[in-house]
Image (cartoon, rainbow, N blue to C red):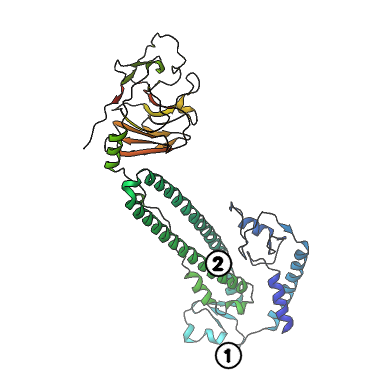
Amino acid sequence: MAFATSLEELQLGARCPICLDFLTDPVTIECGHNFCHSCIQQTWENIQDRPPCPVCRHQCQDWHFRSNAQLGKMSEIVKLLHITRGKRKSQEETRLCKQHSQVLTLFCEEDKELLCPLCAQSPDHQGHHVRPIKEAASHHRKRLHSYIMSLKKQVADLEKLTAMHDRNLSELREKVETKRQKLFSEFEHLNHILECEQGTLLSRLAYEEKKIQHKLNENIASFSEYISTLKILQKEVAEKSVMSEEKLLADIKSIHHRYQSLKSPVPYSFQLRKEGLSLPLQYSALQKIKQKFTEDVILDPETAHLNLLVSEDKKSVIFVNKKQRLQPNPKRFMIDLAVLGSEGFDSGRHYWEVQVDDKPEWAVGVCKDFLPRKGQGLLSGQNRGWTIHLLDGVYVAEGTAPVTIPLTERPRGIGIYLDYELGEITFYSLNERSHIHTFTDKFSEILKPYFCTGHDSKPLTICAVKDDE
């Protein structure tokens, strides 16, 4: 008895935990567990990050496999012992019918029972599909092998889903943190009128994060539990499939039923509510900005590109096809179809408005006064200015890196607010007095209003700021 137990333990140690067959070309991974080389390579095939051990889930640092030739030889010896002992046991073990004391040589497919010839003739099995044990065992062995492949695939798929949910948790934290930082920035700008709303929205965001995280954790737990169930069934099926015909068919009905009753948990997906993370500009905030910080901005014709014509009151500029013949001026733009405001700002808070109407192409904002006028254009340079521009129907915020802005309504006027000490440049749509975008940076040079017309003949106009109250 002790010998049989020891031999079974030896056989288990010589089997691959993935395919459950005797080890072939065995390799040892970082945590010390052994696998067939092809099995572990196939299991880790589509994993990008640190691969987990299929047995202990240890996150391996690298993909290095150490060949284990000694274990391979031992596996071959154990396999031979298993085959020899199996043949001997099959010869020794001959099960008899308890009712008729005859050898069990038949199998009923309907009742999944072993029968002797007399049992097969009883009324209980009349009309049933009864066939020889070897034929039935061969049939069911094939079905069990198909179960093994299916179970292996389900385990692999669910492990991928579990890994995906782990990544979703990280993605959730990153997205929440990004949106939290955006909320903090906007609340800082409008803190005096949005303090109460800040607490409400952040609490809503935290609650939503906690709720989603709880559901994801529940989903991961469900998958882990289901994986364990599959692995247990996989092991039982693998052990059953290599048994003698009689043992294989004994209680085979239960295994078929358990396999066919498997039902995988449904993956949970999430999406943060947009309405909980967007802050519409309050009317009163922009109204106070207009009242306190409006500047009488005028254009500087000496900076205007030769294809631009500045109006006499220096409030409007248009593109013309024919270049003007003017004296050379180092301040003049040679690349951008642009012109600057005449006054620069190196401190304080300043606000002005630009009428864009239905121009198909334009850019407005702020740029550094030392911006090169002959080289690379503003929109192709880096950290030279902060603008909103329209090109090919797409609105883009151009700062250190371009950001596409999804506007539902086309603005006909743009409000620009510079807070030099706070390091913010904010753009508003004058249609609904709504917030478009805010740049945050550190300013140390003189900044000037920037206007780019594009190639159409419609004007850009600095309009008088009107009191909305």
Residue 408 appears in view: no
Query: In the drawing, does residue 454 fall left or right of residue 225?
Result: left
Q: Which quadrant does the N terminus fall into?
A: bottom right
Measured as percent of width and height from the top left, residue 20 is found at 64, 67
Query: In the drawing, does residue 345 fall left or right of residue 158?
Result: left
* Real-space Cα separation, disc 1 to disc 2, in angstroms: 31 Å
Residue 426 in which image quadrant? top left
Mark number displayed over residue 284: none
Type of residue at label 1? Answer: Lys
- Residue in the picture at 57% in, 71% down: 232
> Is residue 206 placed above or below 4 in the rendered structure?
above
Query: In the drawing, does residue 286 fall left or right of residue 303?
Result: left
Foreground residue among 318 and 246: 318
Query: In the drawing, does residue 368 fall left or right of residue 105?
Result: left
Element type at mark 2: helix
- Residue in the picture at 31% in, 44% down: 280
> Is residue 338 placed above or below 110 in the rendered structure?
above
Look at mark 2 in the image and give the residue it sits on.
147
Measured as percent of width and height from the top left, residue 201 is found at 35, 53
Measured as percent of width and height from the top left, residue 375 is found at 50, 20
Look at mark 1 in the image and give the residue it sits on.
98
Type of residue at label 2? Answer: Tyr
Total count of labels: 2
Residue 78 in which image quadrant? bottom right
